[in-house]
Amino acid sequence: MRQYSIGDYILTGITFIAYSVPAFWLGLMMIIAFSVKLGWLPTSGIVNAELTPGSWEAIVDWMKHLILPVAVLAISEIIQVQRFMRSSMLEVLRQDYLTTARAKGLSEGVVVGRHALKNALIPVVTIIAVTMPRVVGGSTVVETVFAYPGMGRLLYTSIMGNDFVVAMTVVMIIAITVVFFNLLADILYGWLDPRIRYQS
Amino acid sequence: MAGSTPEFAIKAEAIDLPTAEIGYWRVVWHRFKRHRVAYVGFFFFVLLLLAVIVGPYLAPYELDQVSLSERMQMPSAKHWLGTDELGRDTWVRIMHGGRVSLAVGLTVGLSTVLLGGLIGIIAGYVGGVLDNALMRLVDTIYTIPRIVLLLVLSKLAGPGLLNIIIILVALEWTNAARLARSAVLSFREQEFVLAAQCLGASRWRVMLRHLLPNSLAPLIVSATLDAGAAIRAETTLSFLGLGIQPPTPSWGNLLTNAATNIFIAPLQVFLPGLFIFFALMSFNLLGDALRDALDPRLAERGGK
């Protein structure tokens, strides 16, 4: 994603369209495509109850159940990262130090890959840090679509059942992941941009 | 010339002001028109609006006209988009659902901007303790995961169109408030505000007559994007069974309803979502185009 090239237009167009797709619908469409029509993957749940727990088949089956929910969550995540990565990259590419890097005779790959990418990653790290807890806490909607018994669905069922103690615990765990990923992001900033120092 | 400078200056201002105002909006309109993306968004939006208003009357079926002999049909000349598990016409149901979903989106988009904009302007202009209190409230709403708030509030408030709208407005005014506040903060110390104050304008007059029009640009963009977000939130809630309840169709609960028959009639799942997708896309496109058009920092550039 470097200029206003055709590739840029196509990629940005795709992410823009994908950005407007509601996650639950995307999940249902994937169920239709891969489970109903093609019959490759299971529609819902976490593992086939008929298989003996711990056996090789059960593990494979468990993985099969993971593919679709993970794909849906990953797609919505990728879209956000792409949007930020693009604008942050465009910003960085305009900077003077890239001209310097090119003037030193570095190849385009090194210039973009090392000098530009590392600096462009800073805002992206923020975005990932903000969105990761949502993935860890499980997207309530995606887990509901796939009837996947994760934390997101637990949150949903507990709120629906007036079981607020469970709901509060889930929120607590999400809060901890928020703090954890923010800490991680802060550490990463220091690695990406040595100018950022935390000592007073 | 030197002798007549004051008079000249006053005249110039008197002539310049109205044209400058028209000029800004004309430039905005001009940029908006040149934005090809805007056309697509606007086209879809108008098309959806028209379909939703006129749509139900085009097919000779009532909203809940059950026909058990025509259950779960594929699209045909008789039922354009097929029928659901009770033989109700999908086209009519989606159009009615669209009325609900679009109405929620537009109402929420408008009211968040009115409420949030006003709160933001007051917070930014008055400042002090009030500003602090309001902004901490905004922070609090931001901190708690959105889906948790949505679920808990709609569970507490109970289902219903009005409740959904109130909940969404209560959660989404924060965006507009932040935007309006930051705009006001940058204008507050400028000369035109001082001039208005010196002329004896009341607080409200300064806020509504001078600060509001100047912070309008980000608010308009925010309204468009909020409307999209509201439709997304409403359909999600309805999909989870907390939003609009089944006898009244909404794009979200049509989807849930169809999802139970996903093996028999996948098309019925596809269609409501497609309309949600078009609605979200048109709002997002419009929002993006408006942001580009309204941003005064983007100088007129050729071509791109």
Image (spheres, helix red, strand yellow):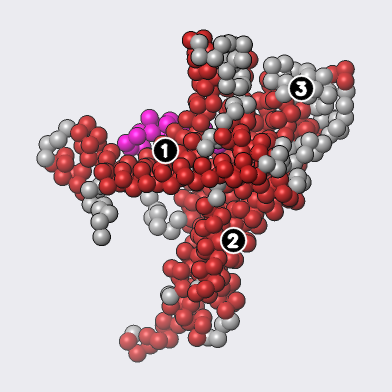
- In this rendering, would A199 be left or right of A48? left
Q: Is residue A50 visible?
A: yes
- Asked if B188 appears above or below B158 in the picture, the reply is below
Q: How many numbered discs sit on the rendered protein?
A: 3
Tell me where residue A138 appears, x and y as whole percent: 53, 34
Q: Magenta span has A6?
A: yes
Query: Which SS class for mark 2?
Result: helix
Mark identifier at residue B116: 2
Q: Are marks 2 and 3 in contact (CB under 8 Å)?
A: no
Marking on residue B82: 3
* Residue at the left extreme of this rendering: A104
The kind of secondary structure element at disc 1 is helix
Magenta-drawn segment: A1-20
Task: Give the residue number, with chain letter if any, for mark 1.
Answer: A81
Q: Chain of mark 3?
A: B
Q: Looking at the image, is B267 positioned above or below residue B143?
A: above
Badge number at residue A161: none
Quadrant of the snapshot with the N terminus of chain A:
top left
Q: What secondary structure characterizes most of the magenta part?
A: helix
Residue that appears at 80% across and 27% down = B89
Q: Residue furthest bottom?
A: B3
Give the image location of residue B139, x and y in percent. 51, 58
Query: Where does the image place residue B28, in percent across and percent down from the top left?
Result: 50, 55
Quadrant where the C terminus of chain A sits is: bottom left
Which three-letter amino acid code belongs to the residue tagged 1? Answer: Val
Q: Foreground residue, B26 or A175?
A: A175
Q: Nearer the viewer, mark 2 or mark 3?
A: 2
Q: Residue at coordinates 47% horizontally, 30% vertically from top-left?
A: A74
Specify the quadrant of the image occupied by residue B62.
top right
Q: What residue lies at 43% left-to-right and 78% top-to-bottom?
A: B191
